[in-house]
Image (spheres, rainbow, N blue to C red):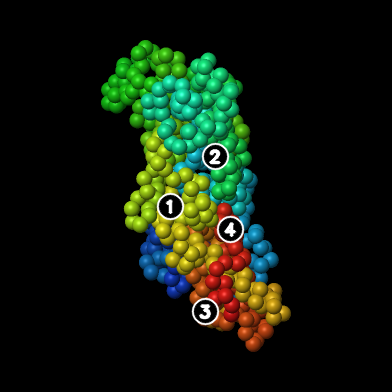
Amino acid sequence: MVWNELTEGLSEALRAVGLWSEERLARIELAIPRDPAHGDWTTNLALLLAKDAKQAPRALAEALRQATRIDPAIISGIEVAGPGFLNFRYAPAFLESLPARIATEGERFGSSTGGAGTRILVEYVSANPTGPLNVVSARAAAVGATLVRLLAATGHAAEGEFYVNDAGAQVDLLGESVAARFAERAGIPRPFPEHGYQGAYIAEVAAGLPAGEAGAALERGDSGWFRDRALEGMLAGQQRDLAAYGAEFARWFRESALHRSGAVDETLARLEARGMTYRARQPEAFSGDRPPAPETEGGPALGDATFLRTHRFGDDMDRVVVRANGSPTYLLPDIAYHRDKHARAFRHAIDLWGPDHHGYIPRMKAALLALGLEPDFLEVITVQQINLMSKGEPVKMSKRAGEFVTLRDLMDDVGADCAKFFFLMRSTSAHLDFDLDLARTRNDENPAYYVQYAHARIASVLRFAAERGLSAGTGRVTLGQPEETALARKLAAFPEVVRGAAAAREPHRLPTFLTETAAEFHRFYHACRVVGDDAGRSRERLLLSEAARLVLRNGLALMGVSAPERMEREAEALP
């Protein structure tokens, strides 16, 4: 990987000029400039270290340039530019041999081993099992599944997991809602629970229950029977929809299993043994400049509650983990769940949470520090909300009222491929306006269609050539035209895009890169006749086209998006 070559070369240069240290090595930032005039790679390392070196940035950049040793078969030129940037340029032979290398590596191109097998658990979606998944979960599913693939592609042992919140009051409310709807169908008086779930799916669940068993449960007042049946039905539906969407989970972890196993009590005992808890009346637990104690989930404590010393680890106050009535708050089983992750030998846990959980992040991290876990064990990615837009107006969503667009609805409407591509186009930290009207179109304005069509166009070109007895070459490609060089440069960036997206936890880099790659191919295709009278030149351009196809396919695969061989307008793809 070029990034490794450059990093190692700069590391040795730092040694040569007497500036090497682990901290300075970590400050090496490498980027791929958009403007070819600025080289193929660039770094501002000299600008960052000029103060430490007590040198002018350009003087330090020149010293680093002279000391940097990189394989000349990869980088043929290093130059100092601007106030002190170091720009690197590919050796022509590197770009000329790249298409053959991509063809040889196939689906492995873009992958690397930098993760060294580090075990990472990505918990994502984890929606309450109280109804079908909505589009908010759909975005989290697209991001989480892609992140797992990115981490695996960069040498990590990554797995996905869904945490099932099946031990809370919401599941009880689900059961009460289904029982009320069944009673309504049976003509039995039963009030609908306040704040109950009123979506049409509740009536559908009730209608699907075995009448005899449900009637008997209703007669004996067994709400638990309805809760259990509704829960399993909701989970089965979520699992089916996520599987159809391409989101894979190594495990569906149930919160109820934590309670049954005693893990919650064991976690509390562990915290107590570490001296991280104390008992106090909640209103009296704070003094001085600490904020006043808020109400817990179940209201203000009436007696002595058990507090966790999270304030000591950066939280804005200590937190109740066991209420005065003896019931745990939501925080305690969450701590137990992450303790379980750590016990399963995962080095890092990455959680994808919604923006409504933003305030929960510091207390969760503080709680795990109180437990004694590594400071970098937990990483939380906030997946911002989305607005479904149609005809310029937002589509309203409300789970309790049942007026919401489900994941299944979205897949049926625009397709799973398009939905995932659109969800991944923006950073998770940014709100997303999902344009349903654009997603339904099948033309170049739709970015998902645009990238898939580029892949299908190349496949069409290759079939056209095969019909005429031509196949892609296996040697170097002559990059005589600017469009050929530009396409090769773009393909060379793919391994770094994958590495960078995994390291920064930014899957949105993939659709950006793929859209740019598709554009470069289309420019090349229109400027350079692929299958022409010169058989040798045709084979070279077929090899460059095949390399572009493989990069597009590999990138789409990381996103969980298909790479079709045939699409509408294919006739336009003929040379």
Task: Assign a secondary structure to mark 3.
Answer: helix
- Give the residue type that dot 4 points to: Ser
- Give the residue type that dot 2 points to: Gln
Q: Residue at x 56, y 59 (%)?
A: 555
Q: Quadrant of the N terminus?
A: bottom right
Q: Position of residue 217 (x, y in %)?
A: 54, 19
Q: Position of residue 235 (x, y in %)?
A: 55, 35
Q: Earlier in the sequence, mark 4 or mark 3?
A: 3
Instruction: Find the distance from the CA under tag 2 to the CA under tag 4.
Output: 22 Å
Instruction: Find the distance from the CA under tag 3 to the CA under tag 2.
Output: 45 Å
Q: Residue at x 44, y 74 (%)?
A: 37
- Residue to which mark 1 is pinned: 427
Task: Assign a secondary structure to mark 1.
Answer: loop
- Residue to which mark 2 is pinned: 238
Q: Earlier in the sequence, mark 3 or mark 2?
A: 2
Instruction: Find the distance from the CA under tag 1 to the CA under tag 4.
Output: 21 Å
The reply to whether discs 2 and 4 touch (Cβ–Cβ < 8 Å) is no
Q: Position of residue 396 (x, y in %)?
A: 36, 45
Vertical order, 483 against 196 (above or below): below
The reply to whether discs 4 and 3 touch (Cβ–Cβ < 8 Å) is no
The disc label shown at residue 526, or none: 3
The reply to whether discs 3 and 2 touch (Cβ–Cβ < 8 Å) is no
